[in-house]
Image: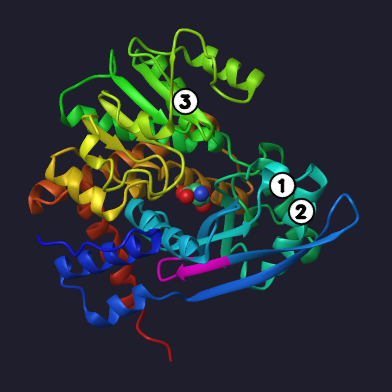
Amino acid sequence: MSEKISVNSAWQTALTQLDNVSMTMMLSEDVHQLLRNFERILTVSIPVRMDNGSLRVFNGFRVQHNSARGPYKGGVRYHPDLTLDDLKALAMEMTWKCSLVGVPFGGAKGGIICNPKVLSKGELERLTRRFTYAIMPIIGIEKDILAPDVNTNEQIMAWMMDTYSMNNGYCTPGIVTGKPVNIGGSLGRTDATGLGITFSIASAIKSKKINFKGLKVAIQGYGNVGSTVGKLLSEMGSKIVAVSSSKGGVFNPKGLNHIALMKHYKEHGSFDNFPRAESITNEALLELPCDVLVPAAMGNQITKENADKIKAKMVVEGANGPTTLEADHILNERKIPVVPDILANAGGVIVSYFEWVQDVQCYFWCEHEVNAKLKNLLDRSYEEVFRLSQERKVNLRTAAMILAVKKVADAISVRGLYP
Ligand code: GLU
């Protein structure tokens, strides 16, 4: 298959991926056009009283891509470099992710342009509450359900849930997922993305007949997602050879101790001077010799500049959109398998779906049940993607996209066009 290679932005990547897969699937031009567009994009301004008495106006967005298969679903990210185009790419990706793994939701994403690291807790709370209020007309338990993403957490979800509930007049836990367990959060949600990535690594190494013992893994981004992968893999006897935070990372080919890493980061706020390890940059981490590379930080990390230098035997995408289109092409040519984000990191939205189901039913499951159901869904999805990739002789990303786009296209076709 010849692929159109396009410029290096997340949104261009998302669009070109859709165009390419639509061509491969011979998707009708009507459906293709519908999927290239968004059902709704809301831009809001968020005035916040700062601690020093001044007023600052932030910009926020909620992007709703497609709801053919169910209510919109997706996280909210807080980042100083956030753009509407990034959110469009991420919202579209949520449509594919939910579809691929059979979660009955459509795709959305939201965010605020801000640096949460320089805001006080009070400022963060006021920002979160005013944003939630501003997007209230377009969200709802059966309309659009929010969740955590980059720089947002359980506490922020709790404020969102409270703001929505107060304005709604009654307690509405199902409006957000990833909230604390004592207000309707699901057991297992915090670790779900990392656990899901670990299940994906298990499936990927099984198909290459390798096992966890002694597996060398490099993880870019050792936050909630990356560190869960590190913890679980260490427990299974793998070697975590390198990890990083936004400030840089550390490398030891003999393996790093997960507990010591977490302790060091907690005490120092970085991995600098971690004992018996070499300091490395985030860029260098990607080029280290290892069996599995897990980019679990931000998007656009594996690019045409470094894809040639990647020495990992496989890449498992923990972050959303870590590989650019050109890099994907290079890795494909080099026969380095890439487990795509919409499969590898789908554990988060899968358990978000379980959380929503539990909230709606007011009936909660034990952690074992949550994790078993997660494994079941992810293993099945991996199997479907792997089988199609073998049948059609395409890479895992193309196979995943074909499966995901087809289910959305079928839903659009059977529902028909209103009016
Ligand atoms: N932000 C996560 C993702 O990108 C989770 C979304 C959700 O749980 O709705 O998949």
Residue on which disc 2 sits = 162
Front residue (pair 210, 325): 325
Q: Reading the chain from its start, which is encountered first: label 2 or label 3?
A: 2
Out of 142 and 314, give the one closest to the viewer: 314
Amino acid type assigned to the residue bearing label 3 in the image: Gly
| Mark 3 element type | strand
Q: Residue at x 46, y 31 (%)?
A: 226
What is the quadrant of residue 24 in the picture? bottom left
**In what quadrant of the picture does the C terminus appear?**
bottom left
Mark 2 element type = helix
Does the rendering let one see residue 333? yes
The residue tagged 3 is: 249
Mark 1 or mark 3, whichever is nearer to me = 3
Residue at the image point whose x is 66% and y is 18% from the top: 267
Label 1 amino acid?
Ala
Residues in magenta, as a range: 62-70
The residue that disc 1 covers is 158
Residue 17 drawn at (x, y percent): 27, 62
Mark 3 crowdedness (10 Å alpha carbons): few <14, some 14-19, many ≥20: many
| Rendering coords of residue 211 (x, y %) | 24, 19
